[in-house]
């Protein structure tokens, strides 16, 4: 079952590896997929999320074939349903999904991807532009934090937890969900304005990485004990600091490379403080059906409860992705950035 589709579409792609932004291309005559398999749906996207991971693909930190359509999450409307997907989706359904190539007008999404059929949970009048933006801004960030604070390190009441980039997209969610458990967030960010925003989202102790000594401050806030866990999305530049601020038997959750990948190191470095080291990726935690059933329900519950502030700092046009990437990677932004897809 399908609707009449155009032959070409607008997409954001990279055509090569580059440290800079010159390989990001906005292409207006890219073919609309016409090879949708039985276990896929085709989605006409409304909003697509901006995530730091695109920089890793562009810089070659994570491999990909070129040309490569960017984007990892979006919300939109189902316009074609593969045969084996017909029991769960119909043309016209509103969906939110995590999947490749979402910075496009049309994206093929496989049954293996995390997909929420919003039309099953909301009546038509509730499916507002505001709700679509909120879902688009939350899917990866909220699920990342939900899974990491439960599975990478199970955050407990009274823990002290160090969070870098605490005013970023993922960071503001960490601040809120860790605080909700009754643990203390020690927030690191590069400016006082960013730290104030982290505080508004629950962070208790604030460390300005541009002016403060992080290790000294953590010692002060934890009476010299160190933190139970560190959620480190910065990678190369913060590895040594993270090792130092962890307490005995602490957990190092390394989940990003904003400053570059962590250099190889001997495992024996973990011994003196018997540290645990986890290198999670969201998709791994959502892969099994039971996990997705649990987290998708929890995600919808949290979205509907209003207990989480979702901070969308800017909505860019799809064609302005390059500007969004420059803003994000030059540390100018807070909260989440999303792209409005031309309809
Ligand atoms: P953010 O909004 O957090 O933006 C990145 C922030 O990182 C910047 O604002 C900046 O904050 C900080 N930063 C520190 N050093 C650098 C640097 N050298 N260059 C650029 N930024 C730097 O982005 P996202 O919320 O999209 O992602 C946050 C991190 O989480 C990323 O590393 C991303 O890859 C990771 N992630 C990993 C997932 C996984 O499955 N493993 C899933 C989702 C996200 P400040 O100026 O305050 O230091």
Image (cartoon, grey):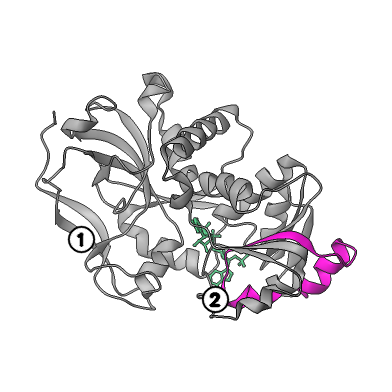
- 233 relative to 180 in the view: left or right: left
Q: Is residue 246 visible?
A: yes
On screen, 161 above or below 150?
below
Cα distance in 3D space between marks 1 and 2? 34 Å
Q: Is residue 201 visible?
A: no
Dividing the image into 4 quarters, which one contains the C terminus? Answer: top left
Give the structural element (helix, strand or loop) at label 1. Answer: strand
On screen, 330 above or below 134?
below
Q: Position of residue 282 (x, y in %)?
A: 48, 52
Going from N to C along the chain, the mark reached first, 1 or 2, is 1
Give the structural element (helix, strand or loop) at label 2. Answer: loop
Crowd band around label 2 with a 10 angstrom C-alpha radius: few (<14), some (14–19), many (20+): some
Pointer 1 residue: 27
- 21 relative to 295 in the view: left or right: left
In reply to whether residue 86 is colored magenta, the answer given is no
Foreground pick, 112 / 76? 112
User: In percent of the image, x 26 and y 51: which residue is there?
Assistant: 104
Pointer 2 residue: 262
Q: Which residues are magenta?
A: 213-241
Specify the quadrant of the image occupied by residue 109. top left
User: In percent of the image, x 34 and y 78: which residue is there?
Assistant: 18
- 312 relative to 318 in the view: left or right: right
Foreground pick, 141 / 12? 141
Q: Nearer the viewer, mark 1 or mark 2?
A: 2
Crowd band around label 1 with a 10 angstrom C-alpha radius: few (<14), some (14–19), many (20+): some
User: In percent of the image, x 70 and y 48: which residue is there?
Assistant: 155
Dividing the image into 4 quarters, which one contains the N terminus? Answer: top left
């Amino acid at each position: 079952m399908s609707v009449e589709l155009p032959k070409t579409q607008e997409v954001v792609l990279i055509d090569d590896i580059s440290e800079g932004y010159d390989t990001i291309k906005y292409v207006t005559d890219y073919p609309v997929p016409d090879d949708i398999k039985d276990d896929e749906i085709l989605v006409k996207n409304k909003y697509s999320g901006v995530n730091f991971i695109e920089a890793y693909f562009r810089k070659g930190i994570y491999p990909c074939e070129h040309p490569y359509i960017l984007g990892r999450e979006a919300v939109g409307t189902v316009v074609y349903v593969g045969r084996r997907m017909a029991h769960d989706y119909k043309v016209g359904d509103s969906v939110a999904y995590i999947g490749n190539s979402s910075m496009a007008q049309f994206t093929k999404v496989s049954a293996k991807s995390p997909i929420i059929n919003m039309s099953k949970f909301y009546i038509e009048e509730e499916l507002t532009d505001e709700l679509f933006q909120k879902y688009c801004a939350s899917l990866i960030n909220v699920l990342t934090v939900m899974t990491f604070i439960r599975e990478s390190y199970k955050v407990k009441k009274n823990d002290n937890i160090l969070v870098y980039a605490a005013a970023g997209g993922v960071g503001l969610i960490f601040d809120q969900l860790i605080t909700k458990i009754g643990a203390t967030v020690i927030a690191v960010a590069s400016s006082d304005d960013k730290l104030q925003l982290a505080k508004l989202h629950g962070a208790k102790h604030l460390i300005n990485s541009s002016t403060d000594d992080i290790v000294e401050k953590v010692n002060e806030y934890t009476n010299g004990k160190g933190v139970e866990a560190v959620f480190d999305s910065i990678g190369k530049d913060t590895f040594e600091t993270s090792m130092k601020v962890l307490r005995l038997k602490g957990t190092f959750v390394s989940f990003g490379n904003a400053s570059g990948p962590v250099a190889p190191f001997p495992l024996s470095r973990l011994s003196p403080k018997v540290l645990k080291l986890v290198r999670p990726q969201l998709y791994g935690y959502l892969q099994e059906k039971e996990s997705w059933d649990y987290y998708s329900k929890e995600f919808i519950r949290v979205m509907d409860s209003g207990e989480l502030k979702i901070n969308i700092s800017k909505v860019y046009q799809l064609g302005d992705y390059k500007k969004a990437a420059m803003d994000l990677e030059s540390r100018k932004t807070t909260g989440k950035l999303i792209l409005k897809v031309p309809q």
